[in-house]
Image: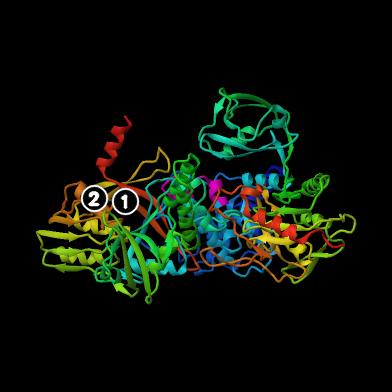
Amino acid sequence: MSENSKHIVAAAWVVAVAGSVVAGAAIRDRIDLSGPGSGPKIENLVASRDNGDGVRPQTEIPAGDFFFDLTEKLKQEYVEPITDDAKLASGAVRGMIGYLGDPKSIYMDKDEFRAYLKARQGQYEGIGADLEVLISQPNAKANRSVLQPTPTEEDSDPRQQALAPGGASVPSFPRLTVTSVVPGGPADKAGVKAGDQVYSVDDHWIINGDLAARFYKAEKDFKAKSIPLSALNDLRKEVRTKYERMLLPLRAKAKLFLGNAGVVKVVWDRPHVGQVTTSIDRAPSQRPGFTVNNDTINLPLTQGVPEQLHSALAGKSAVTIDLRNNTLGDFGVMRKCLAELAPAGNYGYEATDRNTTAKPTPLTVVNGNSKPPKITVLTDRTTRGAAEVLALALSSKGVAKLSGNETGGSREVFDVVQLPDGSGYTLVTSRYRTQMDIKTAKVAKK
Amino acid sequence: MNATKTIAAGIGLVGCLAFGFGWRDIQHGKLPPVRVIDSLFGVKAVSAASPEQIFKQSYQRILSSYNRPVKAQELKYAGMEGLMASLGDPHTVFFPPKDAQAFLEETHANFFGVGARLQTDPLGAKVATVFENGPASAAGMKKGDLITTVDGKSVLGIDIDLIVDKIKGAEGSVVHLSVVRQGVPKPVQLTIKRARIVAPTAESQYLSDSGMGYLQVTSFAEPTMMQFNQEVEKLERNPLKGLVIDLRGNPGGLLETAVDMLSMFVSDKVAVKMKFRDGHEEVAKTRDNLQHEFKYPIAILMNEDSASAAEIFAGVLKDYGKVTLVGTHSYGKASVQNVFPMVDNSSAKITIARYYLPFTPFFGRTVDQDGVFIKGGLEPDVKVDLDWSKVEPVLGEPAKDNQLQRAIEILKEKGPAPK
């Protein structure tokens, strides 16, 4: 071997050794980020996206290392031994979801998440109703304190946030609202209606920015001498009473959504009516499954339904699809149902607000129903989520006629993610827009 | 020969690959977890993901998939806050860099500013206190002034923290403020040179009507011992029949300061016992060279916002029979925290021990799952609620502060302290 080729071989060795080390580290990175083989993600919700937007954490200290360091610090220093690492991880995830301040991106503990997954299959516990925290303002910072306050030294008592001065300048009026009731379930029997807002549960008042706003106004009025001290004191008494017995909206939701026994006393604010008091027996209840009654199809968006729909449509020239009382539908199932009902084509977009340059993802049917029947869709305000998107997609292209005069106004598309300890969360990934919506937005921009 | 060489080379390369694979663990000083190796060979590992991975997966998912833009840094910090919150201890908290800095300033109680404390007002920021001998005081700022512009820019309706940020700056630099003062038709212009401020944490007032001293301690910071001492001396220049130490709303602060201050009352005695996780105990004793002779009875005012070092201070004095506690029960923070700096200037405040008073049983606060108070805190000797029904209370003004009034009555009944 000549001197020259010896050098080349030596260089090749250096490259090979270095390459191996780097490759090893790269493989490890990929494994660490990919998660366990079974996957924490629940099958068939929204197909996983790749990071096409080029969004990558630009932090100096990688988040994982930071997490590791803090966990180690706690293990060394905390007054009690740390035995449950997984709890720390779930806590961190809860913190991140809470940070989003988004009423549709919600962390649920083990019990809540189990009940949620069952409800998606139509099996309910508790009072037999879907409840959502509806917030009029898309203000993440203000919503955060209402949805999931992160304890800090001064505000460790969540009740204080009900009266925090910040509440007065940015009043947030979250209302825990019934979005639909299970027909024949406990809530239905007690006369609860979609649109009812929870005022109190077992005499625990649900935190509400309205009280803080009224209190600060009264304080100001008293200083300006336009109301007497007695009026201010009456309000103080109300604040103190409510402060002693207060519930955060998501905690109240868990009380109504969980459990198969026990009576719960709920006071509702019913729009245009006033306060209604109900006593509800918690008990299991069930939504009707896929049913065909003459030409009317009740279409829950749960696993297996697209296949049933396929055979039900055979030979029919006209059908009515009932999408009322349909709130927790699966987006993957919805897509398949759309393909059963509609011919190939584009049925709107899943648009994100992530950045301005990202193109919305089209909601496309590839192998559709080339000879669809005449379709009428029944909707009302209990048509929400995947069901609402299905209704709008069908009507946007004139494939179906909507018979109801409204839908629920909940068009967010979200992932459902389960963590290893059984807790889980929902994460909004986009919002459905029809082609018309996109055009209108473009015109508005111009 | 050649074959052996190739095999050796192959083994060498595999070794390097393994080294790269395990590098992160080597950095952390441990072996790669079994699960990570398992997944290389397609072994299913249900629910065995490491906590670090569980966190990282969701972190990446939120960053890349959430509908709205997310700031990676803030998301990370929110995760750390949630991690700490999962322990259910309201005093173990994570401070992002900004909060970490504020926390440092609070405990050191000195920063570059103008020497005034502000409070929220719909029109800007209202001056609540002007510190004696501070630059604002020298420039003519008065209590009650309404700051409307900072360096020519309006601060109407701006968050108070942001106004304070604008007013603070480098030592020696100048800030121009425009203030509205009651009874003065035109806005007053103030030019103030920023300086290192030692915020007063102890302020006193001699109440000549009753002959009582009123000494308000707002926190236990580094300079508090010295300031407390000075205020006591100032009060004792008057014929003093009693002393009311007001700890209402005092959130605590440095344990060391509280123990030093206790040394003025009791010499070389156990102040507080700290019990750590491994069962070992540490005892903080008062010093034996700081004792002061208090020739008059003393009462301490406290409420549910009196916490931590304030409770130690009050509780130890109660245990040694030096004071009468007046007001409502205190907060009940019976634990000790240490602040650990993290990389990137954030920090972690972690409960490292629980503390026990000399005689009073453990008084740590317990709350229900909604954070509502169940029990805990020091019980007052004389329970008095603040009375809102007749006048708008003003703390420190006997006529408008029924708790202070009651404390004065108690001290009058007691008369001079027995020798």
Q: A83 or B290, which is in the foreground? A: B290
Q: In this view, does B155 lie above or below B229?
A: above
Density class for disc 2 (Cα within 10 Å; few <14, some 14-19, many ≥20) is many
Q: Is mark 1 on a helix, strand or loop?
A: loop
Density class for disc 1 (Cα within 10 Å; few <14, some 14-19, many ≥20) is many
Classify residue A74 by image quadrant: bottom right
Count of all numbered marks drawn on residues in the image: 2
**Subunit under mark 1:** A
Q: A249 or B243, which is in the foreground? A: B243
Q: Position of residue A59 (x, y in %)?
A: 58, 45
Image position of A252 (left or right of A337): right
Q: Position of residue A214 (x, y in %)?
A: 43, 48
Q: Can residue A65 be seen at all in this image of the molecule?
A: no
Q: In this view, does B49 lie above or below B225?
A: below
Image position of A15 (left or right of B370): right
As drawn, the label of residue A219 is none
Upstream in sequence: badge 1 or badge 2: 2
Looking at the picture, which amino acid does disc 1 mark?
Arg
CA gap, disc 1 to disc 2?
Answer: 9 Å
* Residue at image mark 2: A392
Q: Is mark 2 on a helix, strand or loop?
A: helix
Q: What is the span of residues highlighted in magenta in the rendered image?
A: B63-77
Q: Position of residue B150 (x, y in %)?
A: 59, 28
* Residue at image mark 1: A411
**Subunit under mark 2:** A
Image position of B63 (left or right of B347): left
Q: Magenta residues: mostly which secondary structure? A: helix
Q: B280 or A171, which is in the foreground? A: A171
Q: A100 or A307, which is in the foreground? A: A100
